[in-house]
Structure formats: structure tokens, C-alpha cells
Image (cartoon, rainbow, N blue to C red):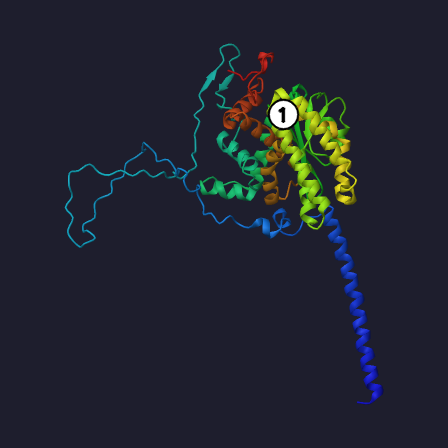
């Protein structure tokens, strides 16, 4: 190889390396933007929230499962009665090889709980006939128990379909398989039609829940995505001590919140989502859990930042003091003033503000300084919005299975059924009984049953029918 050829070869190598460097620099720039967005809390590291914590914090304690050493153990209590007896004969030979002779001693007992396989039951209603003495019209006995005009599926089966969708979050396909195992064959479309008809019957209950919200002194609110035919959609949640109300809407704007809380003048627990702060005539109890969690995430994502760590530690400590102060009503007022002053000092600490993410939370604290300590002096309030967060969790799990609704009507059907089911469960009621009463009221006329214990002053005509 000549000297000129060697020079040309080296120049080509350098050109390829320069091109490679430019390409890598572009990728580094894109990754840097992703990392910065993630630090600001707009993205979650692959693996979920658990992956945000350092591995040092995720180490196990080394203790085995079960209760700690020295604590009394526990196990499943054994049944004390049996539905049927099954005799187990003694074996013919012993483990030593000898012949075993049966004795007249009392047999030993061992209880085992087992499931009885569910099966479809077909009921034939033999409807008696009669004739009116006055008009001579022929009369056929109506179907009992809120069955309606001409049903093919019983009330209990329809109630189970509603519960499978709302309580368990099963998809139409999973519900279809579950019922097929019990001998009842349904199509996906048939199941969805039952859900639609059930929502039509329970719609009066949904309106009953809406009417109760303005009467409450305390409420909790949250919202979560619920796609409609692959497009954006939302499920709104309003809770009071008596009510669990869900509402489906394409919008996440303030007009929905204002519609749901029309007439409400109590105290609203929520996160820091701005639409709730547009509501007029109400007090606010913002969620400390959201505030402390965001501070913790900043500290975990920026372990080198002493400002972030210091801010989170002080903020977490203040919340602990507030929760403890609420338990001591005699000194709650004084403690609330002291905590408010310390919270203000934290929010105006210029040294901590050198961290931009911390400064953002400091500004949030200053905007809601008074509201953040409201819960300390009111035993009816809570320091977090965790009640609504926990209520939303089953929906979030089910949403990942189903992917949302296929139409606006389907989304609202889900919201109506879910509202009634969750409210009945909140009060320890029997949904099947409420569902049956609602069907009787719908098909035969009468008042919709009360979904929660009737309060003093509630009109008697709102009570469940006899």
C-alpha cells in the first residue's frame, strides 16, 4: 500500500468516526431531555414506582414469613359443624405390614371446607289465569320479583353480571367464561345488554346519590382516565360519608367538577388539581400525601441534592406532627398555628429554593398554606385524599383488563352500575336485595329503594317499599 492510499484510508476512518460521534451526540441529547422530564415528575421509570427507589432501600429484612418470634401464632379456624358426613374406612394393612382389625371405637373427626359446584337452574313459572268480573278481560298472573315482562335471565344472574363488572372488574369475555362453567351460556353482546338495562333500572339510584352530595359537610374527589373507543375519556369520583358517585365524561375540565358539586358548601378533599379550586363557596382540605410523595420522589431522583432530601424530611415531619395534633383536640388550635408557621418557614427557605423542583413545591405550599392545616382542628376532616384513591384502585385494575368503554353510553352504564354497587357496599348492604327492589319499582311502579340508611328528616316516601 502506498503512502497516499494509507492517508486516504485513515481519512475515511476519521470521517466514519465523526459521523458516528454526531449520531451519538444526537441520541445523548434526546436521552437528556427524557431524563430531565422524568426528574420533573412527568415520566415514571420503567418498572413502576418501586423502581424509583434505590436498591439499598428495597433490601429485605431477612425475617421469614409469619408472625415475629415470640408472638402467638394463628391459623385458619376449623369449622365446628358439617353439612354432610363421609366415612373413611380403616386400611387393611398397617405400615408395619400387619393386618388391621376394625374396632368399635368412635371415629376420628377432621373438617374440610369445600366448594359446591354452581349450576344453572331453570325455573318454570306456571302463571295462573283469571277473568275480571267487571270488564270480563282475561288476566294472566304477572311474573314475580321484578323480572319484568319477558325475561330470559333471572334477577340473581343479572345482579351477578353487574357485580362481576363493577366489583371484580371482569371483562365481558371473562364473565362469559365464568357463567359457562356454571352451565349458563351468554354472548358478550348479551352480557353488555344486561349491563345497559341494569343501568337504566339503577339510573334513579344514581340521581338519588347526586341529590345527596349538596347535603354533605365533607366530600372527597378524584378523577381517572377511562377511554371511550380508544379516545380520551375520564371517570370522576365524588365521595361523602354516605355516597360513592361515579360520573363518566369525555372532559377533565372544570365544568364537570362544577356540575358534580353544584350546591355543595362543605369541605372538599382533593389533590392539587386546579379545577377543584375553581369551585366557589366551599372550603378545601388538600392532600398531604400527594405533597409528601412528590417531595420523596424528587429526593429519590436527585440523591446528590441536599436541598431535596432536607425538604422532604422536614415536610414529612410536619405532616406527622399535624396528624398527631388532630388526635389532641384540646391543643389542636395552638398546634395548628405552630405547624402553619413552620410550614411557612419551609416554603420560604431560600437555600432550599436553589433546587428548581423543590422551589415548585414551595410555591404550591404558599398558595395553599391555610388549607393545609385545616384538617388539624376539624375531627371530621382527613389530612389526605387517600379515601378516594383507595376507592379508585379496583377501577384502575379493571381498566387495564378491559381498556375502557366502546361508547359514551357504555361508559355511563359502567359509572351508574359502579356507583350503586359501591354505595351499597359502603353501608354493608346486599346488592341483590337492592337490585331486586329497584327492578320491582321500575317495572311495577313505586319509589326507588334507599341506598343508605335514611337520615332524620328524610321524607318517608323515599324509604324502601314494603
Where is residue 443? Give x, y as percent: 56, 22
Q: Is residue 103 left or right of residue 350?
A: left
Which residue is at a point 81% across and 66% down the rendered structure image? Answer: 22
The residue under label 1 is: 240
The image quadrant of residue 392 is top right
Residue 400 % position (x, y): 61, 44
Using the image as rendered, state which of residue 435 and residue 36 is in the foreground.
36
Q: Is residue 238 above or below residue 225?
A: above
In this rendering, the answer to whether 27 lies above or below 79 is: below
- From where the camera sits, is residue 407 visible? no
Residue 79's image quarter? top left
Residue 168 position (above or below residue 260): below
Q: Depth check: 113 or 341 in front? A: 341
For this orientation, the residue located farthest to the bottom is 2
77, 328: nearer the viewer: 328
Where is residue 280 shown, x and y percent of the image? 77, 24
Amino acid at each position: 500500500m502506498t503512502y497516499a492510499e494509507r492517508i486516504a484510508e485513515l481519512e475515511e476512518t476519521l470521517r466514519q468516526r465523526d459521523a458516528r460521534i454526531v449520531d451519538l451526540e444526537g441520541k445523548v441529547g434526546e436521552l437528556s431531555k427524557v431524563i430531565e422530564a422524568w426528574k420533573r415528575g412527568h415520566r415514571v421509570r420503567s418498572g413502576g414506582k418501586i423502581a424509583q427507589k434505590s436498591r439499598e432501600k428495597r433490601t429485605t429484612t431477612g425475617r421469614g414469613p409469619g408472625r415475629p418470634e415470640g408472638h402467638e401464632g394463628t391459623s385458619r379456624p376449623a369449622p365446628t359443624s358439617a353439612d354432610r358426613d363421609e366415612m373413611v374406612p380403616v386400611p387393611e394393612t398397617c405400615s408395619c405390614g400387619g393386618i388391621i382389625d376394625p374396632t368399635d371405637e368412635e371415629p376420628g373427626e377432621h373438617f374440610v371446607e369445600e366448594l359446591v359446584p354452581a349450576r344453572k337452574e331453570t325455573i318454570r313459572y306456571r302463571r295462573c289465569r283469571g277473568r275480571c268480573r267487571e270488564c270480563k278481560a282475561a288476566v294472566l298472573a304477572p311474573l314475580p320479583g321484578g323480572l319484568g315482562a319477558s325475561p330470559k335471565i333471572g334477577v340473581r344472574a343479572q345482579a351477578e353480571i353487574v357485580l362481576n363488572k363493577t366489583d371484580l372488574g371482569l371483562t365481558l369475555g371473562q364473565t362469559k367464561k365464568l357463567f359457562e362453567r356454571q352451565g349458563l351460556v351468554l354472548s358478550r353482546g348479551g352480557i353488555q345488554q344486561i349491563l345497559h338495562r341494569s343501568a337504566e333500572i339503577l339510573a334513579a339510584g344514581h340521581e338519588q346519590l347526586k341529590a345527596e352530595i349538596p347535603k354533605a359537610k365533607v366530600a372527597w374527589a378524584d378523577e381517572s382516565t377511562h377511554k371511550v373507543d380508544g379516545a380520551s375519556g375520564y371517570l370522576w369520583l365524588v365521595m361523602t360519608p354516605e355516597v360513592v358517585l361515579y360520573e363518566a365524561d369525555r372532559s377533565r375540565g372544570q365544568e364537570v367538577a362544577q356540575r358534580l358539586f353544584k350546591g355543595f358548601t362543605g369541605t372538599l378533599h382533593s389533590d392539587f388539581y386546579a379545577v377543584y379550586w375553581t369551585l366557589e363557596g366551599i372550603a378545601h382540605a388538600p392532600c398531604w400525601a400527594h405533597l409528601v410523595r412528590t417531595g420523596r420522589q424528587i429526593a429519590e431522583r436527585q440523591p446528590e441534592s441536599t436541598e431535596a432530601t432536607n425538604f422532604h424530611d422536614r415536610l414529612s415531619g410536619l405532616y406527622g406532627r399535624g396528624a398527631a395534633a388532630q388526635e389532641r383536640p384540646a391543643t389542636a388550635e395552638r398546634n395548628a398555628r405552630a405547624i402553619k408557621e413552620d410550614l411557612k418557614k419551609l416554603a420560604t427557605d431560600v437555600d432550599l429554593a436553589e433546587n428548581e423542583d423543590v422551589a415548585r413545591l414551595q410555591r404550591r405550599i404558599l398558595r395553599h398554606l391555610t388549607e393545609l392545616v385545616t384538617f388539624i382542628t376539624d375531627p371530621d376532616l382527613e389530612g389526605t385524599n387517600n379515601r378516594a384513591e383507595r376507592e379508585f384502585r379496583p377501577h384502575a385494575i379493571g381498566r387495564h383488563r378491559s381498556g375502557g368503554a366502546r361508547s359514551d353510553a357504555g361508559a355511563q352504564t359502567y359509572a351508574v352500575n359502579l356507583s350503586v354497587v359501591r354505595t351499597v357496599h359502603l353501608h354493608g348492604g346486599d346488592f341483590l336485595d337492592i337490585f331486586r327492589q329497584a327492578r320491582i319499582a321500575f317495572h311495577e311502579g313505586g319509589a326507588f329503594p334507599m341506598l343508605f340508611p335514611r337520615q332524620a328528616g328524610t321524607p318517608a316516601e323515599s324509604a324502601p317499599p314494603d
